[in-house]
Image (spheres, rainbow, N blue to C red):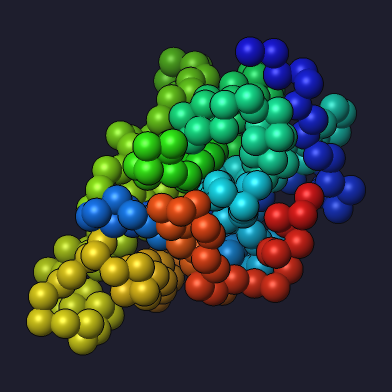
Amino acid sequence: MKSAFIAILVLSLLIPGEVRHGSLVVVIVSQKGDYVVVAAESRQVDISGNVLNDHACKIISLGEDTLFFETGAALIGVQKGESWDALSVARASYRESKKRDAQALSTAWGNVALNWFYGKNREDLRTSREAQDGRIVTGGFVEFESDGSPSVQNQTIFYLDDTKQLRRHPDGAPPGPGQITISGVALGLVQEFFDGKTERAVEAFGPIGMVRLIAVDPTTDSTLAKKAIQFAIDNSTGKEKEALGGPIDVAIIHKNRMIEWVSRKKECYEQDQK
């Protein structure tokens, strides 16, 4: 695939050399496979943990039938050439794709991402990483295929410092019906919330029913996804605490491909028009 035709938006407000990291996204696929819930908080920080933006849009709508989410290095400013913007690459991948299924879109996005990061030196790649396992950025596409089945596909760019290698591949297996996937930081806290084996997790989960019903109702799952992220915000420490914050956006994409925004920052609707 040639990536030259996909334009990456150069943001005039992005300082050359500045890296803006995204943080935490939770995805729940219903047991019946008839809807998918996607939730994300809104904070972006620099490599030192300083808050740059508490109203970032980490979930956007593409063509009114596809959702895109990102974590990791959402924005990177460069002195020369084009800056990295995960959302702009997603829009371009969708616009230029002839096969707009999640697998094809994630592959196109990942190809552009890999091509962009290949041009950077080792120190830039090292400072762009968000996690100890070498993850730099993850981009995920969510949609329903022609047979009515939900599809959640992501591509992640890794930089392995010990081998000095840059790699691109999915960050874990795609979630199936009834499964939850987490991307970003504070993954252990989100897992603790859904496992419900600690007193604080049970308290945060709340009285939703005698049985912990997850992935059976879109309204309930939207509430739980939001609570899971808030649990991570409230209980994280250190760098994870610095990285999490801001309003929590929640979207549901249904089997009929309709996208329902449960909660969303007003300014994020403008992102869908770009």
| Quadrant holding the N terminus | top right
Q: Is residue 26 above or below residue 125?
A: below
| Position of residue 206 in the picture relative to residue 84 (left or right) | left
Give the residue displayed 86% in from the left and 53% down from the top. 13
Give the residue displayed 77% in from the left and 18% down from the top. 4
Q: Is residue 102 above or below residue 238?
A: above
Q: How far across and how far down the image is residue 187, in percent?
A: 34, 54
Toward the bottom, the furthest residue is 207
From this viewpoint, is residue 135 visible?
no
Give the residue displayed 63% in from the left and 47% down from the top. 62
Q: Observer-nearest residue: 131 or 102?
A: 102
Give the residue displayed 29% in from the left and 56% down from the top. 30
Q: How many marks?
A: 0
Q: How far across and how far down the image is residue 234, in percent?
A: 39, 75
| Position of residue 261 in the picture relative to residue 147 (left or right) | right
From this viewpoint, is residue 204 visible?
yes
Q: How far across and how far down the image is residue 119, in percent?
A: 70, 19
Q: Observer-nearest residue: 5 or 218?
A: 218
Q: Observer-nearest residue: 1 or 73?
A: 1
**Which corner quadrant of the image does residue 203 belong to?**
bottom left
| Position of residue 232 in the picture relative to residue 80 (left or right) | left
| Position of residue 26 in the picture relative to residue 56 (left or right) | left
